[in-house]
Image (cartoon, grey):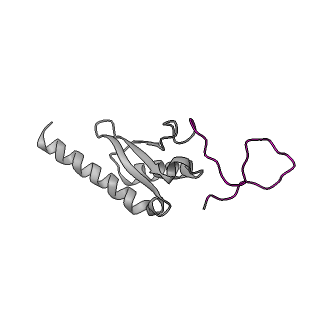
Amino acid sequence: MSTDASNTDDDLKERVTNFLRRNFPQIQMHGGSAAIQHLDREEGEVTIMLGGACSGCGISPMTIQAIKSRMVKEIPEIEKVNAETGMGGDGGHGGMSPSFPGESDSDDSDSDEGPQAPF
């Protein structure tokens, strides 16, 4: 890889990192973290790993969707964003399921009270 390509990759990685810092401070405020796992400039693809409290948070799918939609708009070189929480590798839709206070696995149709917010 040439020095120019390396500098361009470093610049893109820095812009993605700055995007995460600037747009998602609430991730850190709630005990979560976000890090670049993989960046492929040629394919225009980045993989972000959400960790810490994100790995069980019921709103992590919404966080992932926000990252995906905003990043491709703000950083033109990025065409596809993959984001994972470590809960099955698909944004929290597989593997372990997040649970919340007040939520149970049983289908209790007598109760009309929904799950409580996790914060």
Task: Tell me the quarter of the picture where residue 18 sits.
Answer: bottom left
Looking at the rendered structure, the number of numbered marks drawn on it comes to 0
Query: Which residue range is magenta in the image?
Result: 94-118
Q: In this view, does 84 lie to the left or right of 14?
A: right
Left or right for 4, reference 108 = left
In the picture as drawn, the residue positioned furthest to the right comes out as 110
The image shows residue 7 at horizontal and vertical percentages of: 17, 48
Position of residue 14 in the picture relative to residue 114 (left or right): left
Picture quadrant of residue 102: bottom right
Does 47 sit left or right of 14 as displayed? right
Compared with residue 89, is residue 15 higher up or lower down, i.e. above or below?
below
Residue 106 within the segment the image draws in magenta: yes
Is 33 situated above or below 29? above
In front of the other: 41 or 63: 63
**How would you classify the magenta stretch by its main secondary structure?**
loop
- Residue 36 lies, with reference to residue 24, above or below; the image says above
Does the magenta portion include 79?
no
Residue for point 73% across, 42% down: 105
Look at 41% across and 52% down and name the residue there. 34
Image location of residue 1, percent across then percent down = 15, 36
The image shows residue 55 at horizontal and vertical percentages of: 51, 47
